[in-house]
Amino acid sequence: MRFRIITFTCATLLLAVPVFPYGALGHETVGAIADMKLAGTPAGAQVTKLLNGLTLSRASVLADEIKGWDRLPKGQPKPTILKNQPRLQEQLVAFWNANPPTKAKGSDAPTHKEFHYTDVPAVDGSKYVKGNLGTEPYDIVQMIPFCARVLLGEEPENNDRKITKPVALILLAHYVGDIHQPLHVGNAYFSTAGNLVNPSKGGKSFPDHGGNGFRIILADEKNAKGDTKSKGKPSSQKSNKSKGTNLHSFWDSEAVDEALKQVDETIESQPNHKGKVTDEQVIAWFANAEPTDWKPPAKSKPTEWAQFWANDILPMSTQAHERLAFSNVTIKNDSANGDATEIKMPDGISYLNWAGQRTQEELHKAGWRLAAIIEACLDTEKPAAKKSKSTQ
Ligand SMILES: [Zn+2]
């Protein structure tokens, strides 16, 4: 895909940030879908006002970009990541300072890095239950409602996490993307012998931390190297990490590239389509057609939706592991590492193709859900939002 805003607005920082959980392209796509859905609405006008004109697509990658600050020597001023947006930059610095990457001795302040995921066991029938194995008080399923509460006025802007309304929007634009990446929610656990296990059944088990310790080996090595996907695209459009070597990276980047390639092909195959598929056409394709099963349960509050979304993606997290064979598993520092090799499945669908299809669905739902949660929190014409705001 083509709209790599980040590559030219933040080239210097990119060098300092080699890893973008749920690649920048996935986040930008989700943000752009929400931008298009909210355009011309009262909530869209609120977004423009709070973000001083910044789009959700651009805002969606900032929670990862500030990870570049984690490596700076203590006390060094933070490089500007938002030109001409000193107020937003200042608020992001305050957020980073309140949630530092390493915990100070005796401090129970969370780190901003842990807000991006949860580690629920990716086994059949598993659900996110606060306090159960893999969950944390400040995981993604808790942070999305935190941001929603700030926007609703149920949480003061000078909260301990220093999440103001603009920062809440910036974080929501990112976390809603992350919670639709299966390995940001479901985590595989392995026995000492290296077998996939259900940790709730007892026995010692070790997490794979979102697949970061596993090398993925696809059946089609050509696909694993990504050389078919990037054909004909300028280098700036290629994912900076789609090398197919790490299971987590695969889902962050290669699956997104594949999903968008599939959308391109769908648009190209339409009878009236002419010429090259544009970014706008791709985003409109997502924004104009309602995804299946994206809606939250009737009468639920926006602060309850993250848990629903986590439970919605968990079966996919399980399948993302079941379609792989794990080998050479070793346990280092209580974390499982090894190889994850594609299994030939009865449905005949390759891992890359399957991941692309699932990621299409998830990007689609994420874009609609991001727009919906922002609308539910910011549309002052809606009675629910009005009521919450009056409690400020
Ligand atoms: Zn993230």
Image (cartoon, helix red, strand yellow):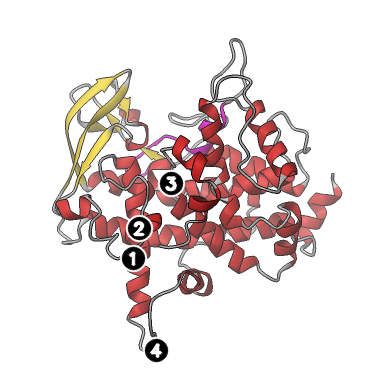
Disc 1 target residue:
261
Q: How far apart are marks 1 and 3 (CA)?
A: 17 Å
> Mark 1: which amino acid?
Lys
Of pointers 4 and 3, the one earlier in the residue sequence: 3
- Residue 106 relative to residue 239: left or right: right
Look at mark 3 in the image and give the residue it sits on: 22
Q: Which mark is residue 272?
A: 4
What distance separates the C-alpha of mark 2 from that of mark 1?
A: 6 Å
Q: Name the residue under label 2.
A: 257
Find out whether residue 123 is within the magenta segment. Answer: yes
Label 4 neighbourhood size at 10 Å, few (<14), some (14-19), many (20+)? few
- Quadrant assignment, res 123: top left
Vertical relation: 310 (above or below) 214: below
Q: Pick whichever of labels 1 and 4 is earlier in the sequence.
A: 1
Residue 357, x across and y down, in percent? 33, 62
Some atom of ligand 1 lies within 8 Å of the CB belonging to the residue at label 1: no
Where disc 1 sits, the SS reads helix
Position above or below: 194 against 17: above
Amino acid type of the residue tagged 2 in the rendering? Asp
Mark 2 CB within 8 Å of ligand 1: no
Q: Residue at x 39, y 62 (%)?
A: 360
Location of residue 89 (image quadrant): top right
| Residue occupying the point 63% across, 47% down | 170
Q: Tags 2 and 1 in contact by the CB under 8 Å rule?
A: yes
